[in-house]
Amino acid sequence: MEIQEVDYKEYKKFVNADIIYNTADFNYLNRYKVDRLHFFLFKDHSYKFAMCAGQRDDKILCPFSAPFASFVALKKQWHILQLEEAIDCFDEFIKSDNQIKFVRFTLPPYIYDENLIVSMQNILLRKNYLIAQEELNFSFNLTNPVNFSFAGRKNLATALRNDLKIRRCENIEDKKIAYDIISQNRQSKGYPLRMTWDQVAETINLVDHDFFIVSNDEVDIASAVIFQVTDKIAQVIYWGDTPGYSSLRPVNFLAHNLVKYYKESRGGGATYLDVGPSTEDGIPNYGLCDFKISTGCSINSKFVLHKNFDR
């Protein structure tokens, strides 16, 4: 196996990644966030794997501007030994560059490609990468009935009694309203909002997406921003309600309707609605974890692994 560093156009020619965060276009769109982009292809008698990452100072980050990323298998059939050889080539490349001293991988939750992700995790651990943290990631399995807790059923019943209405945003003005609701929610809780509206607007030109708004008596009180991360998996990037309306349980109403929408959309072929982690640096937000479980989410691991190459 050998490693080749290529440019954006060459990478795009060979790589048709299932996960949007692994694509050439997504990484190129966010190139201003790092000092340098790296696009790698791994080849023996043919191209087997690919990877894109960003470099900040002496650190290689995969991803550098996304919730997760991984190596990409370029063939449907691949072998664990081939993946291991590709990771060995990558490590040797890093060792040969005296300017790079640190590598970090934030791997996808297992729902995205369990075989590749678990194999990659196993190989990295055996190559002396360390687990920096394990995030708890929550998702709805759209192929199964939703399993509400008692609290979840009670809160949804409250929401359904409150004459809430939901609409899918069809124009950029409505999408901006949805984003502003999220911004108010985050400001009221003191949480950071990592994407500005301009960054969201730029990203949705590239990524299939949905925005939804919940209203009560014609007042917009909650919203959700969702990216279609693969053909089968949609991911909630943001959701939340405006201060003062949580007693109406609009986010429970959102969750109920989003599950229904994605079960039925795209010909009913969606498999998961990913609602993201409820941990920060591996530490659970217990209230948020309980809320997601109450709505019927299941929990999956998302591992962050890193290695220090300082010589």
Image (cartoon, rainbow, N blue to C red):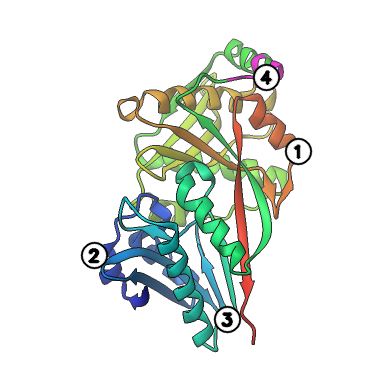
Question: Mark 1 highlights which residue?
Answer: 286
Tell me the residue at 41%/65% (across/down): 51
Q: What stretch is highlighted in magenta?
A: 147-153
Q: Which residue lies furthest to the left in this view?
A: 13
Most foreground residue, 280 or 13: 13
Q: Disc 4 residue type?
A: Ser
Apparent side of residue 195 relative to residue 234 in the rendered image (left or right): right
Question: Mark 2 highlights which residue?
Answer: 13
**Do the residues under discs 1 and 2 have CB atoms within 8 angstroms?**
no
Label 3 to label 4, Cα distance in Å? 47 Å
Spot occupied by residue 176 in the image (x, y as percentages of width and height) = 45, 43
Q: Disc 2 residue type?
A: Lys
Q: What element carries label 4?
A: loop
Apparent side of residue 280 relative to residue 298 in the rendered image (left or right): right
Q: Residue 58 carries which label?
A: 3
Tell me the residue at 50%/87% (across/down): 96
Q: In this view, does 132 lie above or below 40?
A: above
Spot occupied by residue 286 in the image (x, y as percentages of width and height) = 76, 38
Apparent side of residue 144 relative to residue 252 in the rendered image (left or right): left
Q: Earlier in the sequence, mark 3 or mark 4?
A: 3
Q: Is mark 1 on a helix, strand or loop?
A: helix
Q: Is mark 2 on a helix, strand or loop?
A: helix
Label 1 to label 2, Cα distance in Å? 44 Å
Label 3 to label 1, Cα distance in Å? 35 Å
Residue 134 visible in rendering: yes
